[in-house]
Image (spheres, rainbow, N blue to C red):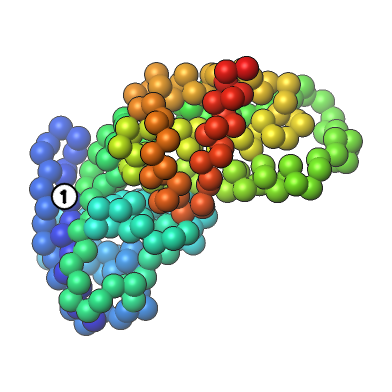
Amino acid sequence: MKIYLKIWRQKNYSEPGFFEDFCLDEVSSDLSLLEALDLLNERLTRESRRPISFDSDCREGICGTCGFLINGRPHGGFEGLTTCQVYLRKFKNEDTLVLEPFRGGPFRIITDLVVDRSKFDEIITAGGYISASVGQAPEANSILVPKEIAEEAFDAAACIGCGACVAACPNGSAMLFTSAKIYHLNKLPQGRPEAKKRASRMISKMIESGFGACSLHGECETVCPKKISLKVINFALREARR
Ligand code: FES
């Protein structure tokens, strides 16, 4: 198949960016979009041109490293898929794909399609952990967790921190990400002792970091590849208020 690409090129944060056009001819529809970009990069390298920078690691939808806008939608807007799971067969022959970096909140463009998501790490550092005294590991079954609580916590823990929620939010809010972390820790008995402190610290850090406040637009839930529900936000706000 033949695919036209319009890709955001930007050398670094301080230089202005622009769209550059490329064409990939006779590529298999069984290639993933990232594999197609790999092919394009091989070509650019052979021609001594600057390859396109983009993030990826696991390429299986697990790590949350990949992510950019495909035709204006984070990860292309395909239900339950990360950018690395998007295959060319999702598009029609001779389609044009516009690829842009995630923009929103304090995500700064590092280069091309790569943005700095380190503010997420700062939010985690503010409370996304459980304090435990050193010593011997406790017996695994000494704190029993009801099945439904374990499952709810696990659903929220599926958040891979890709940043699609921020990119989709008109306020540039990271509330879905922050709340998913609060939810999965606060739901579990091991997380209860620090629950209130965790919620208020992480939400304050999110705002301090430059992300917008949440007004429950719900765009984040729609684009989340792990289908994290808006209910985590209500829960986190309740916890912080308490
Ligand atoms: S590269 Fe790991 S989720 Fe896409």
Q: How many marks?
A: 1
Looking at the image, is 204 positioned above or below residue 45? above
Sort mark 1 into few (<14), some (14-19) or many (20+) by Cα contacts within 10 Å.
Answer: many
Quarter of the image for residue 22 reads: bottom left
- Residue 50, given in percent of the width and then of the height, sits at 16, 55
Quarter of the image for residue 6 reads: bottom left
Of residues 214 and 52, which is closer to you in this image?
214
- Residue 168, given in percent of the width and then of the height, sits at 34, 44
- Residue 159, given in percent of the width and then of the height, sits at 53, 45
Q: Mark 1 points at which residue?
A: 9
Q: Is residue 48 left or right of residue 113?
A: left
Residue found 34% across the figure and 51% down from its top: 74
Q: Is residue 62 left or right of residue 90?
A: right
Residue found 70% across the figure and 48% down from its top: 151
- Residue 1, given in percent of the width and then of the height, sits at 24, 81
Amino acid type assigned to the residue bearing label 1 in the image: Arg
Residue found 62% across the figure and 17% down from its top: 242
